[in-house]
Each structure stands twice: as structure tokens, then as C-alpha cells.
Amino acid sequence: LSVLLLVLHLLQGSRTSLVQLNANGYEGVLIAIDPAVPEDETLITEIKDMVTTASTFLFEATEKRFFFKNVSILIPESWKNTQYKRPKHESYKHADVIVAPPTVPGRDEPYTKQFTACGEKAEYIHFTPDFVLGKKQNEFGPPGRALVHEWAHLRWGVFDEYNDDEPFYMAKSKKIEATRCSIDITGINRVYKCQENNCVTRTCRVDANTKLYEKDCQFFPDKHQTEKTSIMFMQGIDSITRFCNEKNHNREAPSLQNKKCDSRSTWEVISNSEDFKGTVPIAAPPPPPVFSLLKISERIVCLVLDKSESMGNHNRLNRMNQAVKYFLLQTIENGSWVGVVDFDTTAHIKSKLIQIKSNNERRKLLESLPTEASGRISILMPWIMFKEIYPQVDGSEIMLVVAGEDKNIRNCMDRVKQSGAIIHSIALGPNADPAVTEMSAVTGGMHFYTTDQSESRGLTDALWTFGSGNTNSSQHSLQLESKGLMLSSNPWMNGTVTIDSTVGKDTFCLVTWDKQPPGISLWDPSGTPRGNFTVDEDSKMAYLSIPGTAKVGVWTYSLQAKANPETLTITVNSRAANSAVPPITVNAKMNKDTSSFPSPMIVYAEILQGYIPILGASVTAFIESDNGETEVLELLDNGAGADSFKNDGVYSRYFTTYQENGKYSLKVQAAGKAKTVMRSLRHLPNRGTYIPGWAVSGEIEGNPPRPESDEDTQTDLESFTRIASGGAFVISNVSKLPLPDLYPPSQITDLEATSDEDEIRITWTAPGDDFDVGTGKDERSCRTYALQKHGCKVTTCHKMLFSLFHLNIGIYPCFFPEKHIHLCVLFFNCREELVKLLCIALVSDKEGKINVLKTFFPSFRVTA
């Protein structure tokens, strides 16, 4: 287990990035051009210029610590220039920067997909072609500077020092200030409105309710100034070259950096990173970045299948063949080259590379699968055999399914790493060699684990995940249903599958059993029976490919077991109905691949259509342990607990209920109901700073207004279902002894208040008993007498177990005994029109212990 933990540590980080820090220089940086971007050689030139400029800016901004050493640019297969190299381990899934069409047409704002905690790596940076080409420089500043801003999000987990939702705040000086860092950035606050070529500027008015500036007021920085911080506020200001540090950080501002990082400055967070701890400043200027131009080529896949004696246990060989047949019949894309090798003590080429052009090639490959399990295991042998099949290994993929252990595998690890092949692995059962995980880690591949439970769909789900990440999303096979049951007294397994209008092409249904072929019935949304399943009794599976585009709506299935007991499973996949309309997709992951008890983990699931977040879905995570026990978690997009941002399409939850040491696997199911689920057109939480214009000698030099949608959401989505696998992770140091309540409730982060005569109504999302797990996830509210004409009445707070500040404050308890939550609201300066408060939530656990959580608002707006 210790070896596996070390291996999985290599996999931790954002989106399996290949970036390494070597002698102060970032190596392996990958910038990928989306397949939807039209061919434009100028774009490559501008990417190089952007990175070169950014490297120098990054070096100075980090006090001569970091620069970009080598960068690869991944070019779509559809581009015609043939002078580029074939990639090795690089793929679209590894991209640190994506150059892709805007999330919403017309919005070219740069952003970083960031939904993890402060100090943790983010997912990727998104730039649009127009942004990279410099067409948006007036609005967002030079692309090279913007790259450094976004790199700080991506690599070091810092946040913006502005806030589009709270652009102004009341400072301790009782002056309204723009949310910024540092406070020494000068500028003026104005309302700037334009109709065609006629622009009007006026002084901002104070809103009577918020006591802050009106909604249309904007901060226009002085074009000429000397302040050097901060890059995380507005890197487009010429004088800005540094991050805010402990001395000049503006802790009063309601910036995302303050909210997410406990008011620490960005430089404090960066200084605590592993990058920073492992380096010292260098005196000499760094060399310019070295670029590699790589072009996606035809996909080459070799299935490497364990047929040793360990595959004879727990029906593993047959389950593997079922999953591989499913992969060959449905998942692998047309145009791909596929070969098959099986192995025990020796390896055997069962099929040389065949290009899939039709179902004929798929059926031929089905004949190449192993039929008998015997012999010991040598994982090294198929690697040698694959080199015979395809000597030019660069960029090819090996899909390794293995149940046994080979003590000699580590002897060839360096050869594997240098080969240029990407190795994806599936560990089947508890005794699979942990070295295969390392092979995936060092080659940029994916790793999955599946138990020996027959009703588990882990093996099939994992192979489905091995669809190409380098193709347009319209070519991806999407999983709509994955279900398995062990049946005894009740022989029926019934259910429904929803086909929405974004999918329906190449719809494929797979049914498997353990003992006897079941009765299979399938009806389309109009109630018409759909039969003609192909039955493969040797592999104990039946499948149906629906011709054309499957009818939109709810499909119903009914399976009747013919043996008792019996295990039945069903899997349904489909592809995009229209290549011009992105399908709804779900991606699942854990925040890390290894954890030591009692350190919690976080489950994430992101639902998108293209790059647009999907809100209002019901999302459930299934976490299966070594022994087949499954923990079920509802994931939430409410901005509380593990969820960083409300309504960003990322659904999250803490996972703390570890039952045993060992490997776990993750699967997520997402379902949306018509009129409930919707697209989010609202701005992204981490979008780049938009420069509204400049103040020059008291006058405004304005930029065009930022493109915004007239509506925050679109509700024209039908019902849908999706399944996603989230890979494997490992837990260690789980105690077998009874444990106390180890986890406090999550911090309350979304307190809101509205006034009603002499009362304030306070609402918040209550935490769970263990972080966000357990009771208390609902939105809670209370009314408390707070505002009096002549000051605040002082009372006592129930169960307050610590001394309070000696201040003239009002203390008003609000209790929810059934949830074990006690909320005390302390109001400062009640004679003032602006209320200041300290809110302290006390949460009792089962043992009557009190945990104290504090949420401090230097100033608090009360809205009617």
C-alpha cells in the first residue's frame, strides 16, 4: 500500500498536468488549440509571443524565481500543415492552457477553471483566439500579462483581488472604496454610458439601501500611476509588476482572495506553495522559452489483456471480455487503429493494428480476445510485443487490464517513461500490481480500479472513459445509463433512460448476466417495442445498436432474470446528434488521488454543454471500496461546504466516511429535469479583469461596455441523464477502533440579510455535522431584533462558552435545536446607518461538544 500511495502522489494536481518545475523553469507546459478553432498559423505565432512575454513578466513578478522553460503547442488534427511532430504523452486532457471559442459568443474574457480550495491547483486556463491574437488588449491588457495572472490561479491556487458582485465596499475610514489591491491604486468612480458614438459620464450616486455606489458605477483606474501591486487585481495597468504581499495587502476589500484565503495576500499563498519552497532566486535572466509544435494524429490503441491464472477467479476473464467488446463495438472512434495483445508469462499478438472504418473491423477484433485463463504473469512481455506491432510508439495508447502482480515490472519503468506511449490501466481486483498505476502516472495515462463484485459496472465504465480526448466532443461516446443488480426473490430489473436532443446518434445498449440469458424488453418514448438484440451467449452479453438518431424522450427497459440468484447489468451509450450542437457532458474527479485518515477528500462533478455550466441537476456520487461496499453522496452546487462557487456547474461534497484502507473507485450519475435544469449565462467566478477605461486628468477614456447577457440562465433544456467515472484513489491509516466525531461543520460563507422595519432577516446555508455531510444542508433563516432608534439592546447568548469582546454590542441568539445549530449575531455600531456584525455559529455534536465557527464581516450591507 505504501508503494501505491507514493505512486498516486505523482498523479495529484490539476487535470493530470504534465508540468514539472526544474531549476526554476516550468517544463512540459501544454497549450492546446481546440479542434473547433479554424486553422490560422498566426495564432501559433501569437501564442509564442504571449508565452515569451509572460515568461519575463513572471520572472520579475516572482522576484526572479520562476519562468517558462519549454512549452508544447498541441495543434488539431484537422489543420493541414504536416510539418509538425506527433505528440508523445501530450493530449488535450493534459492541457494547461486551452485556446478555444468563447464560452458564450462575444465574450472573449480569459478565465481559469478553478473550483478547488485556496492554495490548490486549478484545472486549466481558457483563452479565446481573438484574445490571443491581441484583439481584446484594450479590454483585458496584454495577453502575456494576462497569462501570468491566470497562471497564478492555475498553479498556486490564488484568487482575484476584485469582485464583480461586490465592486465597492465601506472601508473603516467610512469611505466607499473600490474592491482592489492594493488600496494605493488610484482612480475615479463614475457612471459611463454610451449610445452609439455618444457617451455620457457622471458622478456615482449612493444607493439609499446599500449605502454604497449605485449598480452602474465603475472604478476607472488612473492611466498613469506608480503603484506596483497587484497582478491579481488589474495586471493591465502598466506600473503593476508584483503580487500583493503581507505589508500592502488590502484585507478590508470583499475580494475573492480575502474570502477564499482567510484574508491572506496572494504572495503569502504563493510563498507557501511547493514551487516556492523548492526554489531560490536566480541572478541571471532566464533564457527564452523553447517551443515544440505537436499535431494530433490518427489514434493508435493497443489493448493489452491479462489472461494469467488470476483472471480465472471471480469471473474476471469473462467480465473483462464483456467490457472490451463494449469498448470495441461502441467506444472507440471510427478512424482509430486498434491492436490486441494478451499475456501470461509470455505475450501473444492476437491482432495487428487494424483501422476501424466500419462494423466489419470491430467484429473482426472481437475474435481476438482471450478465451482461457492460465499461467503466471509477466507484464513486461506485452510491452516488448507492442514495440514489434508498432515501432513508432510516440502518442500511441496502451490500455492495460491486469489482475496479477509482476515483481519485475519496475525494471522497465524508465523504458516505459521514455517510450512516448500513454499507458492507461485498469486494476482488476485487490491484488493487481500497484506498479501499473505508476506506469500510468509517468506516461500521462489514466488509472482505474474495479472490484470483483459482479453487479459493479466499474470495468465497463472505466473502458468507456478511454474514449479519445483529442477529438471534437461530438465524436465522444457519452454514457447515459450504467446499472447492475443482484436479483434473488424479485427477478425483475426495470428502469428508464432519457435521450435528450443533444445526443441520440450511435445509441448502444448492452445487457450482461452471470448464468442465463434474461428476458429483455425495450420500448421507445412512443411505447414502440425495440428488439433484435444480438445475443452472445459465450460472453454472456446481449447488445442492440439503434440505427440513425434515437428518438428524444424517456426509453423504458425491463429485464427478467431466468436464474435465481442472478446478476444483471445494463449500459447505454450515445453520441452527439448534431456535430454543431455540443452535447451535455459530465466529468468527475476527487480532489486528490491519495489521502491519509482522517484527512477529508472532496468529490467534484462538472456538468457542461460545451463550456457553459448546467445548473439545477441532481448529482449523485457512488464511491465503492475494495470489498464492494458503496457510499452514496448527493453532490451540491450551493457554494457551501466543499463547493467553492454557487451555480458554476461544479457539484461538490466532502467524503469522510472511510470504512477501510485500500483502493476506492468513483462513479457519478447526473440527472436533469425539464424546466428545472438550465444553462448558466452568468459570468464565470474567475473571469479576467475587464478594464472599463482609464482616467486621464479627471476625464474618462472609455472602452466598449463588457458584453453581458440579458438573462442569467436559459431554461430551454430537456430532461437528461449522464454517467461519469472518476478514477481510483487510495485511503490509508483508517483505524478499526470506534472513532469520536472528528470533523467540524463547514464554515458558513453565504450569510445574507434583509431589513424589515426594526428587524433583520438573516439567511444562510447550514453546514452538515461533518463539514457539509449530514444534517443541515438546507438554507436556514431567522429573524432577530437588531435595529433600535437609539442603539442596540444587549442580551446574552445561549451556550456562549467563551468571553466576548468588551464592546457595546447586541447579541441575539437564533436556535435550531433539531439541527444542533446555534447562531449568534453580534451587531456593532447600531447607531450608524451601516451595520457591522460578527456572526458566530455554534454547532453541537452528538457528544454535546461545541465547535466554534466565525464569520466576520468588516461591514455589512442591509438591503430592503
Image: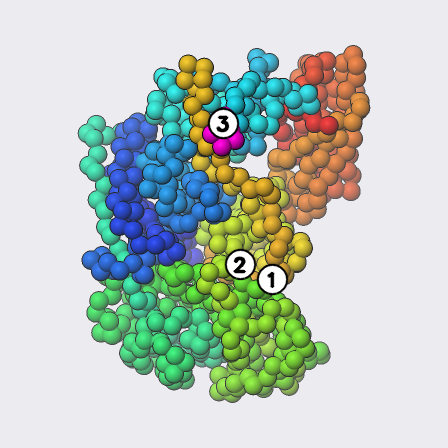
x and y percentages locating residue 412 in the rendered image: 25, 63
Number of the label disc, if any, that sits on residue 198:
3
Number of the label disc, if any, that sits on residue 182:
none
Residue 798 visible? The answer is no
Q: Which of 218 and 248 is in front in this view?
A: 218
Mark 2 residue crowding within 10 angstroms, few (<14) / some (14–19) / many (20+): many
How far apart are the two marked residues, 2 and 3, measured between alpha carbons?
A: 42 Å
Lower sequence index among marks 2 and 3: 3
- Residue placed at 38% from the left, 37% from the top? 136
- Residue placed at 57% from the left, 32% from the top? 165
Mark 1 residue crowding within 10 angstroms, few (<14) / some (14–19) / many (20+): many
Depicted 691 relative to depicted 652: above or below: above
Image quadrant for the N terminus? bottom left
Q: Which amino acid does label 2 sit on?
A: Ile
Number of numbered discs: 3
SS of the residue at dot 1?
A: strand
User: What residue does disc 2 label?
Assistant: 584
Of the residues tagged 3 and 1, which is closer to the observer? Answer: 3
Residue 707 visible? The answer is yes
SS of the residue at dot 3?
A: strand
